[in-house]
Amino acid sequence: MKLATIRYNDKVYAGVVRGEDFVPFQSISAEIPNDMLDFIKGYVDYKKIVDEGVGNASRLCAMKEVEYLSPIPKPPTFRDFMCFEEHFASSYKQSNTKVPEVYYEIPIFYFSNPNVFRGSGEIIPAQPHSENRDFEFEIGIIIGKEGSDISEADAGEYIFGFTILNDWSARDLQYHEMRGLLGPAKGKDYATSMGPVIVTKDELDAFLDKNDPKKAKYDLETKLTLNGKVIRENNTKVIEHSFAKMIERASMDVTLYPGEVLGSGTIGGGTIIEYHGDIPFLQKGDTIDMEVQGIGVLKNIVG
């Protein structure tokens, strides 16, 4: 199932992407709330209603007519991990910094700002205090039910679905503040793009990596395009710490709740700083397309 939050004729709707059409939840049943977070919270009850009713429900419009919003406009929390080794190693190559051992021991994350999420197609406003604006191409994992101290083996039961994330970054602010051995903070909190849709776990499980003994990693082709030029293709199966390991770490000693977002960290080659000056930092009008097999394309323009 593919789900989206959209704006159409100045009204906001949450609903299902049915082929080329958008079907609001409330066109399927008045019992389903017009809010993605509330839908996720009640998914156990709503799933059967949607499965049985979406085929005959009236469409609102064609998807090509909508304005995408972040599928969850304001997630309860946003934890961002760093689970692709290539990104870590490439980003620090020029400073001869080696990947620390702790990176391989645990999936490391920080908390970012859940109040600045944007949708696909939106113009991302300028960060007036930064001259070194960058993007980061990630996978987003949406928590589907409440749980704490979740084991890696059980973590799949807590995943609602997946989406694409762009963790916009102000590198000059980030590097300056992290000299204080804290962060990233201000260099990361002005915008995060998410979308265009959430794909429920049951649908994306068709892409589980058949060669992964734990059946926890996903075999998804990815493509990053900047101003119409493909700059990198990759695959999510090279991830160091699986999405299940991320959930295990995030839930240790605390409770996760439906709708919380975990970012995978940047897929290798998915950010400007990995190219060490060969690609300039972002300028007004730059267009970034992030494509993930089975999910879609997250597209944004720099304001």
Image (spheres, rainbow, N blue to C red):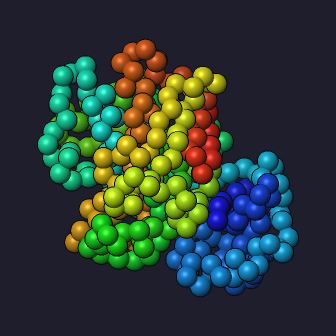
Q: Nearer the viewer, residue 51 or 261?
A: 51
Q: Quadrant of residue 47?
A: bottom right
In the picture, measured across the screen, residue 53 lies left or right of residue 1, that is right
The answer to whether residue 257 is above or below residue 278 is below
Image point (50%, 28%), residue name: 232
Q: Residue visible at 36% across and 18% down?
A: 276
Left or right: residue 244 versus residue 50 is left
Which residue is nearer to you in this view: 41 or 291? 291
Residue at the extreme left of the image, as rendered = 101
Residue ranking furthest to the top: 278
Residue 135 at x, y percent in the picture: 46, 34
Residue 39 at what x, y percent from top left? 59, 74
| Residue at x 57% of width, y 78% of height | 43
Count of number-bearing discs: 0
Q: Considering the image in quadrants, where does the N terminus appear?
A: bottom right
Question: What quarter of the picture does the C terminus occupy?
Answer: top right
Q: Position of residue 165 (x, y in %)?
A: 50, 47
Residue plotted at (62% across, 43% down) = 297
Q: Is residue 38 visible?
A: no
Is 293 rendered above or below residue 177? below
Does residue 263 sit above or below 184 in this rendering?
below
Residue 107 seen by the camera: yes
Q: Residue 72: horizontal and vertical position, in percent?
A: 56, 61
